[in-house]
Amino acid sequence: MDTFAFYPAREEQRRADGLNFAVAVGASASAARVVAETLLGEPNALVGWSSIDLTSAPATFVTGLPVGARAQSTWPNLDRGGSFMRGT
């Protein structure tokens, strides 16, 4: 089984409680999404969120750059306030 990460695809999908990232294991992204929603105790809580298969994703930190560095296109690059995250 693969490991998947889930995060809001758009600003308006962010959760008020700050839980805006989930990791779960499943045979597919949809199966892992159900697992993550079960762990949150909220069915359909992650509908519309982006998912990434972590087995093939780029490293989250490369040469000190955070996941939101402008030079990458896999992870979000804006912080909660809408500003670009630090990086090149």
Image (cartoon, grey):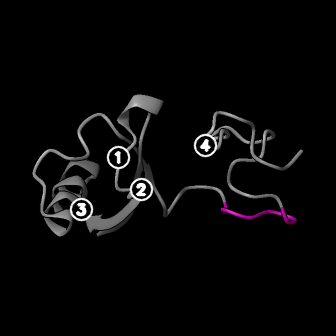
Spatial CA distance of label 4 from label 2 is 21 Å
Q: Relative to residue 32, is residue 49 drawn left or right?
A: right
Q: Which mark is residue 72?
A: none
> Tag 3 or tag 2, which sits nearer the N-term?
2
- Closest to the camera, between mark 3 and mark 4, is 3
Q: Is residue 53 above or below residue 46?
A: below
Q: Which residue is mark 4?
A: 74
Viewer can see residue 3: yes
Q: Quadrant of residue 74?
A: top right
Element under label 2?
loop
Whether tag 2 and tag 1 are in contact, CB under 8 A, the answer is: yes
Q: CA distance from mark 2 to mark 3?
A: 15 Å
Question: Residue tagged by mark 3?
Answer: 36
Q: Which residues are magenta?
A: 59-64
Q: Which of pointers 3 and 1 indicates the residue nearer the eye?
A: 1
Kindly state the secondary structure of the residue where label 3 is placed: helix
Residue at mark 1: 15
Residue at mark 2? 18
Asked if residue 10 shows in the view, the reply is no
Classify 10 Å Cα crowding around label 3: few (below 14), some (14-19), many (20 and above).
many
Residue pictured at 12% horizontal, 63% vertical: 41
Q: Residue at x 10, y 51 (%)?
A: 43
CA distance for labels 3 and 1: 14 Å
CA–CA distance in space, label 3 to label 4: 20 Å
| Residue 58, x across and y down, in percent | 65, 56
Give how far across and how far down residue 45 sits, in percent.
Answer: 20, 47
Q: Quadrant of the N terminus?
A: bottom left
The residue mark sitting in front, 4 or 2, is 2
Secondary structure, mark 4, is loop
Please give the name of the residue rendered at 23% of the width and 38% of the height, measured from the top-left corner: 47
Residue occupying image coordinates x 74% and y 64%? 61
- Residue flagged by tag 3: what amino acid is it? Ala
